[in-house]
Image: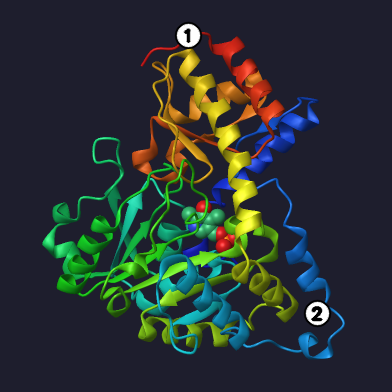
Amino acid sequence: MKRPATRIATIPPYLFARIEEKITNAREKGVDVISLGIGDPDLPTPDYIIEAAKSQLHIGENHRYPSARGMLAYRQAVADFYQKRFGVELDPQAEVCALIGSKEGIANINYCYVDPGDYNLVPSPAYPVYDIATMLAGGQPYYLPLTPQNNFLPDLAAIPAQVLAKAKILWLNYPNNPTGAICNLAFFEEAVAFAKKHDLLICHDGAYSEMTYDGYVAPSFMQVPGAKDTAIEFSSCSKHFNMTGWRVGFAVGCPEAIATLARYKSNVDSGIFQALQYAGIAGLLDPSPAVEAMKQIYAGRRDILVDGFNAMGWQLKAPKATFYLWAPVPAGFTSASFAEFILDEAGVVITPGNGYGGEGEGFFRAALTVGESRMAEAMDRIQRVLGKVSF
Ligand SMILES: *Cc1c(COP(=O)(O)O)cnc(C)c1O
């Protein structure tokens, strides 16, 4: 058998592929595992969205190859969503591209802009696709630390000039996975000015814009005047409407970057099954009932998790967005040894913070992916094995 290419041979399996393996092993040993691991909503897709897809299944037109860029009706629905939700005007022809889930576009945009030897500016910790896809495309990530001290906002002024000279993409993601951090429009404005000065493409990942609590409303990067000159924003129906399995996403913004991404995609994929695009349209045009009910459920789980850890000695604030809690590991543990201890002793899966980048060492992430009673059970078990902790 021929050896795989260096580009793939040097890449570790996706973080969650490794975690899934550990869960399977524990379950095979008979452990009743509670997984707060992978960030995949356990709640079902709302019925009206499922019905919208169902009604399209028998229509012959939908059985043929879709357009890689997405049906115009789908791109129009994305534009309508941006208008209604953010007050942002988008031209559905030039400024919107459908994606087979946003992960697809987040990976592929690197192939569109990165030549060997180029840098991408990548936060650490972060969603693993930004740096892995940078490397697959032959580029090198330059990591921007996100820490409690900087409120999980990268210090753009600290990036060395020689890195900036060879930098192509600045990756940003707010509300943030894995830290749960949020940011205001002022930071996005600063980023746009910085990108224009240094000729960067900003790729903002807005996957969690709708998963917000306590009255917080997340901005779109496209609300910044001039953002479309230098930035695109990725998002999808996955987290907005509990549709992770459907693979219905989109990118919006800078028309040149959207056209480049669409050209790349037309050569490597053939778009989203149209019946699924109709499901996306249903969600995007009438999101409110589904989103509101979902947020209430996540907020309830979040409070159980935060209160549970704080009762053991943590001093965590409830995150205002995402379905993640990002917290330091207690004294005497590393990220990996803490995650392992909690799985072995309590049968609860949390993810080690270093899986999201070097700056994540010393932290763990817990996701709000089980119901309130299982969440309470998970916290009871952790409390039993840990007692009071110090840092
Ligand atoms: C879940 C997630 C995505 C992507 O999800 P898709 O299902 O591919 O649209 C993108 N970015 C972040 C930070 C995520 O957590």
Give the quarter of the image for residue 57.
bottom right
Identify the element where label 2 is drawn.
Answer: loop
Identify the element where label 1 is drawn.
Answer: loop
Above or below for 262 versus 224:
below
What amino acid type should be assigned to the residue bearing mark 2? Gln
Most distant residue in the right direction:
58
- With 49 as the anchor, is 203 left or right in this view? left
Q: Which residue is mark 1?
A: 388
- With 369 as the anchor, is 191 left or right in this view? left
Above or below for 288 versus 341:
below
- With 361 as the anchor, is 366 left or right in this view? right
Which disc is residue 30 wearing? none
Residue 174: image location, x then y, percent: 39, 54
Residue at 45% x, 32% y is 318
For marks 1 and 2 on the same chain, the one whose residue lies earlier in the sequence: 2
Residue at 19% x, 73% y is 196
Give the quarter of the image for residue 269.
bottom right
Above or below for 41 versus 58:
above
Which disc is residue 56 wearing? 2
Residues at marks 1 and 2, CA–CA distance in whole angstroms: 55 Å
